[in-house]
């Protein structure tokens, strides 16, 4: 059983950093950072954060 989606909960730069490291470890995973602040409720895609509600495909 493999992990496909990961949600990182919490606020501040630590949660964003943790989400980024998880995504870099395995780019096929869907990593979502759900902390408080600038990137609240955004999915990390490459070098940018995209709103969760936007239909985004990964290559």
Image (cartoon, rainbow, N blue to C red):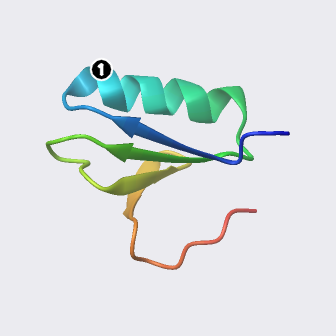
In the image, is 32 to the left or to the right of 2?
left
Q: Residue at x 30, y 56 (%)?
A: 41
Picture quarter with the C terminus: bottom right
**Residue at 43%, 77% in the rendered image:** 54
Examine the image and state in which quarter residue 26 appears.
top right
The quarter holding residue 36 reads top left
Q: Farthest residue in the bottom direction?
A: 55
Report the quarter where the N terminus lies. Answer: top right
Tell me if residue 53 comes above or below residue 12 in the rendering: below
Q: Residue furthest front?
A: 1
With 19 as the anchor, is 57 left or right in this view? right
Vertical comparison of 21 with 7: above or below: above
- Percent position of residue 57, x then y: 65, 71
Please state the horizontal and vertical placement of residue 31, each as a whole percent of the image.
53, 45
Whole-percent x and y of residue 56?
56, 73
Q: How many marks?
A: 1
Please rate how many residues cluster around mark 1, counting C-alpha atoms within 10 Å: few if below 14, some from 14 to 19, many from 20.
Answer: few
Say what secondary structure mark 1 lies in.
helix
Q: Does residue 14 sit above or below 49 in this rendering?
A: above
> Residue at (39%, 24%) from the top-left corner?
17
Residue 13, quarter of picture? top left
Looking at this rendering, what residue extends furthest in the right direction? 1
The residue indicated by pointer 1 is 14
> Residue 58: horizontal and vertical position, in percent?
68, 63
Residue shown at 39% from the left, 75% from the top: 53
Q: Is residue 31 above or below residue 49?
A: above
């Amino acid at each position: 059983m493999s992990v496909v989606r990961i949600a990182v909960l919490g606020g501040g730069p630590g949660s964003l950093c943790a989400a980024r490291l998880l995504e870099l470890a395995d780019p096929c995973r869907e990593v979502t950072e759900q902390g408080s602040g600038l990137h609240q409720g955004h999915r990390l895609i490459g070098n940018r954060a995209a709103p969760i509600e936007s239909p985004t495909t990964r290559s």
